[in-house]
Image (cartoon, grey):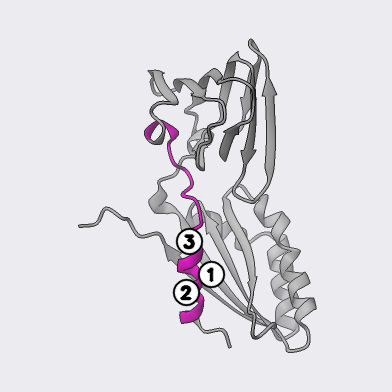
Amino acid sequence: MLTKTSAFCLLLVTNFCVPLFAVDPVQVYPNNYKVLLENDQVRVLDFILRKGDTEDFHSHPAHVLYVLAPLKIKFSFPDGRLGMREAKPGDVLFSEAVTHSPVNIGDNDAHGILVELKTPNAAKAMPSTEDFLTAVTFIRGMEGKELEVKSELLSLSKPTRAEPGCLQYDLYQSPTKPNEFMRLEMWRTPADLEAHKLTPHLKASFERRKNQGWMTDITVWNRVKEDIR
C-alpha cells in the first residue's frame, strides 16, 4: 500500500514545482507595475511587459485594462490551460478575478493602465497565502479495477478545476501498485475545500466509490511561512 510517508515525500518534491499563487505583482515586479492611485475603491497601475518577458504566477482582482500600446500576450493558468489576448491602443478590456502567468509574444512592449477593483467580490481573489490549503487524498481501489478507478477519478478533474476556489487538482498513480492513487489539491481557503465536498459531482463520485469498496483517506496541509526565525 502507498504509505503516507512516501506520499508526503512526493508532496514535498511536487510542491517545489508548484507556483505560489495570489502573489501581488506590484511587489514582485516593481519595474513592470507603478501605482498611480490607490484608495478604498480602486488601485490604478501603469503596466508594462517588455517584449519577450514573462512573469510568474500572480493574481489580480476584477479589473479594467486601457491599452496604450499594441499587445499580444500568452497566458498560462493554474489548471494547465493556455490563453491568448491581443489588443490595439485605445481598447478597453475587462477581466474577472484571475490568477495567471503572462509572457509577451508580441513585437513590442505591452503597455496599459490597469484599474483593479476593490469590491467585496474582487477582494476574494487576493486571499493571504497563509490561508491556502493543500489537500492530499489517498485512494485504493480493487485490484484489477485500475482503469475503472482512474476513469472515475479523472472525471472529477474538469468540474473541480472550474470551481472558483480551486488552484490545483492533479491525480497521481503508484508505479508499483496501479490500484493506488494520490490526488494533490490546492484551495484558496479552507472554506473553498468544504464547499467542494458538497458539490454534486464529488458527492456522487464518493458514493460510487464507497459502494464499490474503494478506500479514501483525505489529509489536509497548510503552507509553512518561510519567514519564521
Instruction: State which tag comes first along the sequence, 2 or 3.
Output: 2
Question: What's the amino acid at mark 2?
Answer: Phe
In this rendering, would 29 be left or right of 73? left
Disc number placed over residue 8 in the picture, else none: 2
Which stretch did the figure color magenta?
5-27
Name the residue carrying label 1: 136
| Image quadrant in which you'd find residue 221 | bottom left
Name the residue carrying label 3: 15
Main secondary structure found in the magenta portion? helix
**Is 20 a magenta residue?**
yes
Instruction: State which tag comes first along the sequence, 3 or 1.
Output: 3
Q: Residue at (69%, 73%) from the top-left corner? A: 206
- Neighbours of disc 1 within 10 Å: few (<14), some (14-19), many (20+): many
Mark 2 to mark 3 CA distance (whole Å):
10 Å
Q: Position of residue 68 (x, y in %)?
A: 57, 13
In contact (CB < 8 Å): disc 2 and disc 1: yes
Regarding residue 78, the answer to whether it shows in the image is yes
Mark 2 to mark 1 CA distance (whole Å):
9 Å
